[in-house]
Image (cartoon, rainbow, N blue to C red):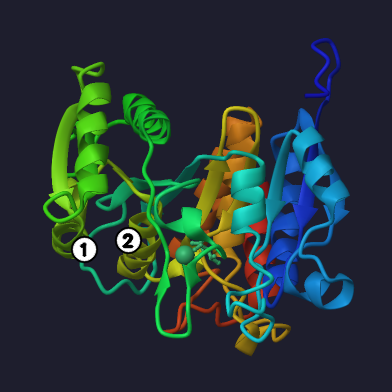
């Protein structure tokens, strides 16, 4: 932190990576909203160090993130990135070369991937519920599980294996993180009960039975929070049929990847979904979706995920009032229709106009 207690203006040093596909236009849209909130809420500013990362960089330079960029991210107070990756840019093993999950999540040890799923007003969600009735967080383990095998699968021409590994340390810290989040929330929308749901496949896999055992040990330390277990297949159904029941869900990496997109689908699409990658010393923030190259550069993409991502980063930097101002502006814009989404979840007046409308709502307070 560069905060000096007696300065009128808090400055936070952040790295911003615009990314691939729709990334640059989404990040630009979020910066329009940042300007508005810096003026409206006041008291702070972000000093932004723009860096490249992703598939376009890989095509140009042969790496998806320069070592000095990782260093800059480690030195920064936080990082925000747009989506990265292009389907045609691949490593020799067939996996995508632009994806930064491995290098950033492992390199920064950001072991928790917090993915809030909230139903907002004015969206065309397939689930019939009122805004506020769906409001939970998927806490996805981010550094082990199935994705420990990222790019490291072994095999022959006839078979390939990716290994899922779950450790005690990794499980203890992610479960503790989930219970700490639940402690700070107001419980599930349906009944106000603070609840952490352990999602696993412990009926089949020993690694997941181990995850559940460690979950129980940590849960014992939080007697005021309800614990619950769901197999991941049943969880997929319950997130569609009874989403109001959920408060915080914790799960292995691969499961969290799948179920967070499912959750996004229930509230009108992943174009509305932000996330935070959180560790003990570093954090970075990004939308949960990909770079949508088919609509890149056309001013079609929904910037809401990136704008809510900015809000999460501001919360993390201690600028909660600014984060709240952004979330409130997003909700009001969707509710009053100054931001209208079509059936694909894209803003009918375009990406940039949507950002301007949300910025205006921030300014109006
Ligand atoms: C996500 C993304 C990444 C992941 C991809 C792009 C590798 O899907 O953040 O959910 O699977 O972790
Ligand atoms: Mn994903």
Q: In this view, does 110 lie above or below 308?
A: above
Q: Is mark 2 on a helix, strand or loop?
A: helix
Q: Quadrant of residue 58?
A: bottom right
Distance of label 1 from label 2 (alpha carbons): 7 Å
- Residue 361 drawn above or below residue 21: above
Do the numbered discs 1 and 2 sit on residues whose CB atoms are within 8 Å? yes
Q: Furthest residue to the top?
A: 6
Horizontal and vertical percent for residue 117?
37, 54
Residue on which disc 1 sits: 236
Beta carbon at label 1 within 8 Å of ligand 2: no
- Would residue 188 be seen by someone viewing this image from the given angle? no
Residue at image point 82% right, 41% down: 71
Which of the image's four quarters has the C terminus?
A: top right
Along the viewing direction, whichever of 48 and 347 lies nearer the viewer? 48
**Residue 192 in view (yes/no):** yes
Name the residue nearer the viewer: 339 or 34.
Answer: 34
**Quadrant (top left, top right, bottom left, bottom right) of the N terminus:** top right
**Circle 2 is placed at which residue position?**
259
For label 1, the SS is helix
* Rendering coords of residue 114 (x, y %): 45, 45
């Amino acid at each position: 932190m560069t905060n000096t207690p007696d300065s009128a203006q808090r400055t936070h040093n952040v790295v911003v990576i615009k990314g691939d596909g729709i990334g640059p236009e989404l990040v630009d849209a979020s910066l329009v909203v940042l300007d508005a909130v810096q003026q409206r809420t006041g008291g702070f500013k972000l000093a932004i160090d723009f860096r490249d990362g992703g598939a376009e960089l890989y095509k140009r330079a042969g790496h998806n993130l320069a070592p000095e960029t990782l260093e800059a991210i480690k030195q920064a107070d936080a990082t925000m990135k747009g989506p990265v990756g292009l389907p045609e840019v691949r490593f020799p093993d067939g996996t995508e070369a632009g994806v930064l999950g491995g290098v950033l999540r492992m390199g920064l040890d950001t072991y928790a991937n917090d993915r809030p799923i909230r139903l907002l007003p004015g969206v065309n969600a397939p689930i019939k519920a009122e805004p506020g009735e769906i409001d939970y967080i998927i806490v996805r383990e981010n550094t082990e599980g199935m994705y420990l095998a990222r790019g490291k699968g072994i095999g022959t021409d006839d078979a390939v294996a990716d290994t899922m590994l779950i450790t005690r340390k990794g499980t203890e810290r992610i479960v503790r993180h989930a219970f700490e989040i639940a402690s700070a929330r107001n419980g599930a929308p349906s009944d106000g009960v603070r609840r952490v749901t352990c999602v696993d496949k412990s009926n089949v896999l020993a690694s997941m039975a181990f995850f559940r055992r460690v979950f129980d040990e940590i849960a014992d330390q939080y007697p005021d929070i309800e614990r619950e277990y769901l197999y991941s297949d049943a969880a997929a159904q319950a997130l569609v049929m009874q989403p109001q029941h959920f408060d915080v869900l914790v799960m292995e990496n691969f499961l969290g990847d799948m179920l967070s997109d499912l959750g996004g689908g229930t509230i009108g699409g992943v174009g509305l979904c932000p996330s935070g990658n959180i560790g003990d010393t570093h954090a970075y923030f990004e939308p949960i979706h990909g770079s949508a190259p088919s609509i890149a550069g056309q001013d079609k993409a929904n910037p809401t995920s990136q704008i809510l991502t900015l809000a999460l980063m501001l919360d993390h930097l201690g600028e909660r009032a600014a984060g709240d101002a952004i979330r409130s502006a997003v909700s009001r814009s969707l509710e009053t229709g100054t931001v209208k989404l079509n059936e694909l979840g894209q803003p009918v007046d375009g990406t940039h106009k949507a950002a301007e409308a949300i910025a205006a709502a921030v300014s109006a307070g």
